[in-house]
Image (cartoon, rainbow, N blue to C red):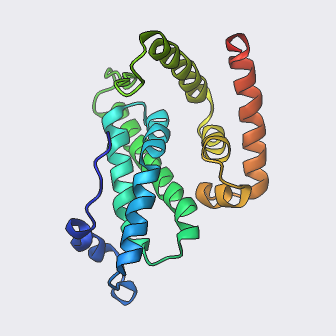
Amino acid sequence: MLQRVNADADDTAVAATVPVATIREPTTLEAASMEQFLAGIGTRAFRFAELGLRQRDDALDAVQDAMTKMLAYRGRPPGEWTPLFWSILRSRIIDVQRRRVFRLRWLSPQSDANDNTIDWADAGPDPARKHDGREAYSRIAEALRALPGRQREAFTLRVLEELDVTATARAMGCSEGSVKTHLSRARAALQRQLEEFR
């Protein structure tokens, strides 16, 4: 499970990255709301990061970093938090992917970067149902991993996270038309890949 971010412990790190003019003490309500927001989005963010990074530890680190960076924006209106968080997480995932490519290319070209182990401890008590859930998630995850990155992001944010087109475009850093195009292509590809699974 994800570890929760302690806002008090990270104030020093946040203060170092935010201009002094924008730093102010959050009200108790803002701090509580941000904590609730991060607690509510943590599991979904982890699954999103895990699909992009394919390694549990890297996904946990990316989500934790994104949550820490969100603390700098706790004074922003809560309506802006969702697309802002996904944009921060997406940037962090891209950074990790770039570093990994560099390491694989220059430092250890024979290393295996495809460790797809997933902990299913929280899948439920019923073994048959647990197995079916594992198999379904595995097939859907593989289908999502096979998509190009932008299509996977558009599908995850629009369909799984239920963000509107405008918020998805802000999170992905592209136009609304691009979001619609990527989503359409992702849906078509997923439909082809999961045809026999229906």
Residue 83 is situated, as x and y percent measured from the top left of the image, at: 57, 60
The residue drawn where x is 45% and y is 52% is 40
Image quarter in which the C terminus is found:
top right
- Asked if 126 appears above or below 160 in the picture, the reply is above
Residue 26 left/right relative to 94? left
Residue 171 left/right relative to 89? right
- Asked if 186 appears above or below 137 in the picture, the reply is below
Residue 101 is situated, as x and y percent measured from the top left of the image, at: 41, 37
Query: Which of these two is toward me, 92 or 69?
Result: 69
Residue 146 is situated, as x and y percent measured from the top left of the image, at: 59, 25
- Asked if 149 appears above or below 29 in the picture, the reply is above
The residue drawn where x is 25% and y is 72% is 11
Residue 109 is situated, as x and y percent measured from the top left of the image, at: 34, 25
Residue 168 falls in image quadrant: bottom right
Residue 99 falls in image quadrant: top left
The residue drawn where x is 69% and y is 18% is 193
The residue most toward the front is: 126
- Asked if 161 appears above or below 85 in the picture, the reply is above
Query: Which of these two is toward me, 79 or 97?
Result: 79
The residue drawn where x is 74% and y is 23% is 191
Image quarter in which the N terminus is found:
top left
Residue 100 falls in image quadrant: top left
